[in-house]
Image: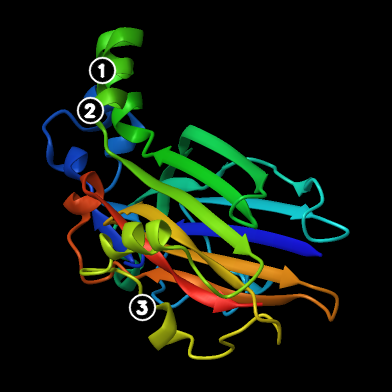
Amino acid sequence: MLFQINVFAWIPLAEVPNPLAALPGGTATWGPGACGPHFGGDNFVKPAATASAWTGTFRAKQAFAFRVTAFGDAPMVTLNPGVTPGLTTVLTAPRAAGGTVCHSLTATVKTSTASVKWSSSDDWYEAKLHGEAQDPVPAAVAAKIGGGAGGAAASALTPNLEWNIKMRFQRGSSIGLLTSAAYATHSALSLDVAAARFPTPTRFGGGGNLVHGTILVRRFPSYVVYTTVDSGSGPVCIPHYFAEASGRNLATIAIGQTDNLRQLSW
């Protein structure tokens, strides 16, 4: 049996304002991060239907997989490359006006952890993934002006995009009362639109088992979690969670929210 989780975070807008470009002094004072009036976004709203079909850019991504011969065996991690950062780009003009990239920096990975453990009392494997990535431009600007201390201060003040996943691959279809009560506290204002945007498939297989859990994300940018299960009949990949941020203000990147993952069968 194979279980895999893929997470992508991206900016659904074509571009977002770059406040550095409006400051007096230009690149001579603020460095190449001030070379254009916009940061480049990833310029798409709906992601691919599977992780393997991803063709767009991203702010950061993470993958994790484990395999067991029989349910209850010790899990063997088969994929754990850590968080992969994307690029922050500065544009000379909006994309629609022919803007081109005048500067780019690789995002800074601030947190990258992944693990899995077997819980015999719950009869599930619990996988945990935590990733954080940060726009590197403010730190680069501050370092140019204030050296290492300035860069560190700017980094500390720059909000990160973030995800923190706790996913349970459970044998059986009955969720305990304590777990159900914990999920109930997160059920009111979910950001998840995966079921509406990806109505099929809705199950990984015909068994009477469940995948469930929680995810913390910042309210900006967009996030998708793909879950793949292969219980012996071939892998099935489903967009398990999708938080779509095209209508939200980028300032909400400072606000975290915990949502339930959909309960899907395998």
Does residue 40 lie above or below 242 as drawn? above
Q: What type is the residue that disc 3 sits on?
A: Val
Report if the CB atoms under discs 3 and 1 are less than 8 Å apart: no
Where, by quadrant of the figure, is residue 82 drawn?
top right
CA neighbours of label 1 inside 10 A, class few (<14), some (14 to 19), many (20+): some
Q: Is residue 265 left or right of residue 225?
A: right
Mark 3 and mark 1 lie on one chain; the one further toward the N terminus is: 1
Report if the CB atoms under discs 1 and 2 are less than 8 Å apart: yes
Q: CA distance from mark 1 to mark 2?
A: 6 Å
Where, by quadrant of the figure, is residue 24 drawn?
top left
Residue beneath the point at 32% across and 16% down: 152
Does residue 141 lie above or below 92 as drawn? above
Q: Is residue 153 left or right of residue 133?
A: left
Q: CA distance from mark 3 to mark 2?
A: 30 Å
Q: Quadrant of the C terminus?
A: bottom right
Q: Quadrant of the N terminus?
A: bottom right
Q: Report x, y in % for residue 196.
A: 39, 87
Depth check, front residue: 178 or 213? 178
Residue at the disc numbered 1: 153
Q: Report x, y in % for residue 165.
A: 48, 51
Residue beneath the point at 22% across and 44% down: 254
Q: What type is the residue that disc 2 sits on?
A: Leu
CA neighbours of label 2 inside 10 A, class few (<14), some (14 to 19), many (20+): few
Residue beneath the point at 57% across and 80% down: 49
Residue at the disc numbered 3: 193
Depth check, front residue: 55 or 110? 110
Depth check, front residue: 89 or 101? 89
SS class, disc 2: helix
Residue beneath the point at 30% across and 41% down: 35
Residue 120 visible in the current orientation:
yes
Where, by quadrant of the figure, is residue 115 drawn?
top right
Residue at the disc numbered 2: 157
